[in-house]
Amino acid sequence: MIFAQVMKAYSVDQIRLLEEKMNAYEHWVFLLILLVAVLILVSVLQRLTIAKLRSFEASKGKYLSKDPTPNSDLSQLNITEVPIADIHTITQTPIHSEMTIGGKDLLDPGLVFKYIVHLDTSKVISIGQREGNIVTRSTDILDHHLTIEICAIDVSNLEMLSYTLELRREGKVLLQLPGARSFREMGNKEKIHISKTLSFDGEPCLESLSPKQPIRFRLGSRINSLGKFNSGYFEFHLYSKDVFEKTDQGTKRIEKHFYLKLVKIFPGYDTAGQTKEGLVPMLARFGG
């Protein structure tokens, strides 16, 4: 009786409406369950990522703690592994390692180097491959290929100073003195004097070294039977200019400043053929 009354209270349309609402509720419940599953998955992934980061930090800390080298030994190790050039020495020794040389690292003709000679110390000029005051980075040049030591003499003369140039070579050098008609092969060790007041038996003495009448040097590897370099050479000119300097007595004295000019690199650098040590050969001359 009661059931019949309940059934009579709902029409067919009302029942259909209730079914549609139930279907909508099912869809919402399904979406909520899917959202909860996605949130759970994100949370699990975050926990895994945090666990990996913590494991990485822990292993990194263990590695650092197991390093047997103390701080004091580290500083000593760094010093021994990486040689540092001493700026107080005349010849600088660079680090010999694999490197690539560009045009800015190579010498250009026209470069002029100025040197002032003090009374109490000599001035040493060294031209070399990777060591010296002038570094060529050329395979045709040796370290300390040419060394020029300039010292002032007759310092008691209050009017004009005289100078002695001591030349030493480790590689092949062609030399031309002012007034000479051609180059000659330089000996292992030679002396040249510059003075207007002194004379030296058996050794050349020049009154001056002007830019138009300098001492000419050609540096290379091998000299042929004609007295010329087979592959190529660097040509330097050494000259001086007079200057007035004040003496301890308050008078003016003529002294000299010296200049070394790179005049020519013949036939030139072959940068495409450089070695892994950063050395550059000469260009191949026409005809081999």
Image (cartoon, rainbow, N blue to C red):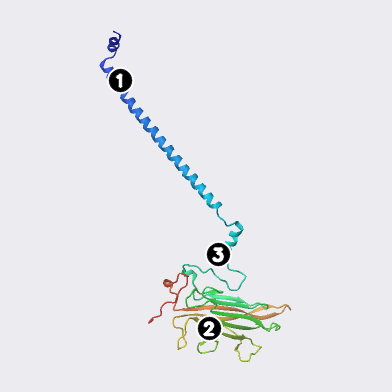
Query: Which x, y percent locates residue 203?
Result: 60, 89
The picture quadrant where one finds residue 288 is: bottom left
Residue located farthest toward the bottom when viewing the structure as drawn: 201
Spatial separation of the CA atoms under disc 2 and disc 1: 114 Å
What is the three-letter code of the residue carrying label 1?
Leu
Residue behind mark 2? 216
Foreground pick, 256 / 215: 215
What is the three-letter code of the residue carrying label 2?
Arg
Foreground pick, 258 / 282: 282
Which sits earlier in the primary sequence, circle 2 or circle 3? 3
Query: Which x, y percent locates residue 182?
Result: 50, 88
Residue mark closest to the camera, 2 vs 1: 1
Q: Which mark is residue 18?
A: 1
Residue mark closest to the camera, 2 vs 3: 3
As drawn, is 268 to the left or to the right of 77?
left
Residue behind mark 3? 81
Figure check: 134 above or below 227: above
Foreground pick, 229 / 196: 229
Which sits earlier in the primary sequence, circle 2 or circle 1? 1
Quadrant including the N terminus: top left
Figure check: 130 above or below 194: above
Query: Which x, y percent locates residue 55?
Result: 49, 45
